[in-house]
Amino acid sequence: MIRPVRVRFAPSPTGPLHLGGVRTALYNYLFAKKMNGKFILRIEDTDQNRFVPGAEKYIMDALNWAGLTLDEGIEQGGKYGPYRQSDRKQLYKQYADQLVESGHAYIAFDSKEEIEAMKTAFASPENPSPSYNFETRLKMKNTIALDKHSIEELQKNNTPFVIRIKVPKNEEIRFEDEIRGTVIFNSSQLDDKVIFKSDGMPTYHLANIVDDYLMEISHVIRGEEWLPSTPIHVLLYQYLGWADKMPQFAHLPLILKPDGNGKLSKRDGDRLGFPVFPLNWENPETNEHSEGFRERGFLPEAFTNMLAFLGWNSGTEQEIFSLNELVDAFSIEKISHSGAKFNFEKALWFNEQYIKKLSDSHFLDLLKVELSKTFPQKQFTDDYVLKAGNLIKERIVFVKDITEKSKYLFENPNYGNDILQKISPTITNVFSEKLLSHIGNLPFNSAQELESNLKQFAENEQVKIGDFMKFMRICIVGELSGPTVPDLMILLGKETVCNRITNCSNSITQ
Ligand code: GLU
């Protein structure tokens, strides 16, 4: 029977979601939607020591921003809930006990110090850091090594204990990975992982397997850093009698630093000046602030499109895909086997493309948000804002460039000495006066007509056309960038243009 597709994104709320985490969520989402399956969020918070306040909300906000709608989760509910592992706490112990009863797990009473002492005692040049495993377990304080009486003594004294999986010696553990093909581990490489802790909580390994089983997860799509844990998971499925319900695994390649040298980290972002988190994050312990892609100005559609291509491609030339188009085009077979280098320039390119594609009404909404932040007191008509936006739409990377780089569209510029020095000495006060009265009679309708008229004027006045246009640009923009002068004149209108020429000319003479 074909299993219904049910996939989960299962982050631990230990901090903000990194780019790689959002990509894992995205691939799970795309696969679920493609297969008419369900996309589930499960919060894996069994490690109380690593709990970070705000992280869970951050994860949900980030998925929401990226458009990755959940079918089941903490807020959505669902019949497989609860979806937060700490709320499922009472569920796990029975499975750990079942493993102890069947002899696949055992109780261990060793303190941290005793484990350290074992590592020192058994360390050798070939094995500098011995594990708690088939070689060492018999020399430790556990229910396999100790006699009945000693165990009873320890229990009577309420000695803290953990439960460890009993990993066999020298057995081949193999599983099929949808991306890597057959993966084989030798069990002797593994240690007897703790599956249940002394604080009464399961560890990641046990909780993850129990929940994937109970939530009927069909495919586990996760980062490649979890590959070394998978043989333990395979054993747990076998030992719990769930081998036929084991999900298909797909381990995603890493997202690498721009130079390809290792995994992309927050420090690379800090060093190279780009975000690695989807949304802003304030570290509650250090108060350190990290900027998110959203706050940098990325459109969510551009962000997810860019992210999809970090480790996957459609096999065609097409690069711009809406989320729905990604769903149609997505397949696990097209995920690459090797790491994907993060390229911030490419991310900017994606945003530029999405800005160009914005509808007038969406663009207007976004522009108004930026304007209300920068000019809270000022009112502009929608018509003006949209015209101003459209004039620079082709040249901006972020919507906020309209206020960060093109303020002159909404307020008169200031003229610094640096820019005034770029005005040719042939532009005199007398020339400005003449220009103002000339412009006063000009119709501001067609950019083309304005341009030829202004050229004619410069010629008549024997001022080089290049010098003249530079002057006009400096008056209007306050610097040497921006759209064409006639386009700007039509947008701003005669009064504003004349005022700016007057202000600029006055600044030269001061
Ligand atoms: N809780 C793990 C994490 O933080 C989940 C890994 C998995 O998907 O199994 O990524």
Image: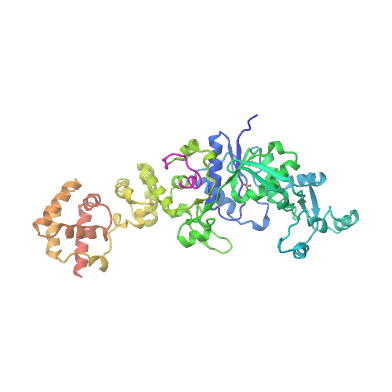
Residue 340 drawn at (x, y percent): 50, 50
**Depth check, front residue: 405 or 222:** 222
Return the residue found at the far bottom. Answer: 510
Return the residue found at the far top. Answer: 1
Residue 357 drawn at (x, y percent): 37, 43
**Depth check, front residue: 95 or 491:** 95
Residues in magenta, as a range: 306-320
Q: Is residue 436 left or right of residue 42?
A: left
Residue at 56% across, 33% down: 36
**Residue 193 on the magenta span:** no
Q: How is the image coloured?
A: rainbow
* Residue 44 visible to the viewer: no
* Residue 234 visible to the viewer: yes
**Residue 316 on the magenta span:** yes
Q: Main secondary structure of the magenta part?
A: loop
Residue at 68% across, 39% down: 246
Q: Is residue 4 above or below residue 188?
A: above
Q: Is residue 245 left or right of residue 37?
A: right
Residue at 77% across, 52% down: 163
Return the residue found at the far front. Answer: 126
Q: Quadrant of the N terminus?
A: top right
**Depth check, front residue: 415 or 103:** 103
Residue 158 drawn at (x, y percent): 83, 58
Residue 510 drawn at (x, y percent): 20, 70
Tally of marks: 0
Return the residue found at the far left. Answer: 460
Q: Is residue 491 left or right of residue 307?
A: left
Q: Is residue 144 left or right of residue 392?
A: right
